[in-house]
Image: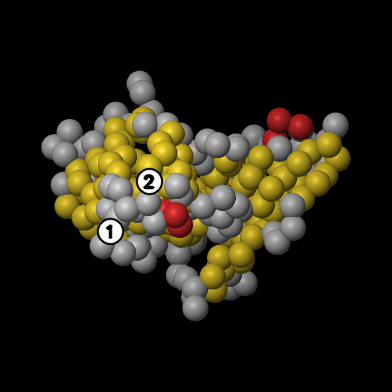
Amino acid sequence: DAGVTQSPTHLIKTRGQQVTLRCSPKSGHDTVSWYQQALGQGPQFIFQYYEEEERQRGNFPDRFSGHQFPNYSSELNVNALLLGDSALYLCASSLIRNRKDKSEAFFGQGTRLTVV
Amino acid sequence: SQKIEQNSEALNIQEGKTATLTCNYTNYSPAYLQWYRQDPGRGPVFLLLIRENEKEKRKERLKVTFDTTLKQSLFHITASQPADSATYLCALHNTGNQFYFGTGTSLTVIP
C-alpha cells in the first residue's frame, strides 16, 4: 500500500513563473490538505480539498489554487512565483467520511520548490 | 492572536534520559492535539493523537499529556536513543479537520 506520494521531489522555477505540484493520497483516503513549510518553521496550512471542492483555506493569496480529481489526487498551483514562495510543500491525506473520531493525517515527502 | 509555541531552544539530552518537549497554545480550542516527528528534508510522521477529553496517552516509549486548562501538551520520550534525534512538531486540530502546527523542537540525543 503506497503512502502519500508527491511529485516532483525538487523543482527550480524563475520568479514570475507558474508551478504545479501533484499529490496522490494514501489508498482509502478522501481528503487532501496542502501545507507550506519554510526552513526552520512548522508547516502552514494552505487549503484542504474534499469531494473535489476546496473546503478550508489558510491565509494564502489567490495565487495559490488547487484542484482535486475524482480519484482523490490533487494539484497545487502557484502563479506569479515570488522568491518568498521557496519552501517545502507538503501534502497530507486523511479520511473524513465516517471517521469523525479519528483524524490522523499521513504526509508525503514533500516537494522542495526553489524560486530564483 | 493565535499562537502555538514549542520549546524555543533546541534540546540536547544524554542517551537513556527522558526528553520532555512542551507545546503551549493561545486562542485555540482544539478538538485534538497531535505530535509528529520530522527528519531533515522529509515530511512529518504521525506519532500520537490525544483528544481534548483525554489527559494522557502512551505508545511504547512515548507519552503525551494534554491540559486544556493550562492550554499545554507535554511530549515525553523515555529511555531516549540517538535514533530519536529529530524535530518534533505539535499540531492542533480544529473541527474543520485543519491542522495548525507549532514551529517544532529540535531534539538531539547524545550517545
Q: Is residue A8 above or below residue B86?
A: above
Residue B10 seen: yes
Labels 2 and 1 in the same subunit: yes
The chain holding disc 1 is: A
The chain holding disc 2 is: A
Q: Position of residue A68 (x, y in %)?
A: 19, 43
Residue sitting at x 43%, y 34%: A10
Crowding around mark 1 (Cα neighbors within 10 Å: few <14, some 14 to 19, many 20+) is few
Residue bearing the label numbered 1? A63
Residue sitting at x 66%, y 40%: B86
Give the amino acid at mark 2. Thr
Residue in the foreground of this view, choosing between B86 and A7: A7
Residue sitting at x 70%, y 35%: B84
Quarter of the image with the C terminus of chain B is top right
Give the amino acid at mark 1. Arg
Q: Element under label 1? A: loop
Of circles 2 and 1, which is in front? Answer: 2
Residue bearing the label numbered 2? A14
Residue sitting at x 62%, y 47%: B88
Q: Is residue B28 left or right of residue A26?
A: right
Report the number of numbered marks.
2
Instruction: Determine which quarter of the picture holds residue A113.
Output: top left
- Earlier residue among tags 2 and 1: 2
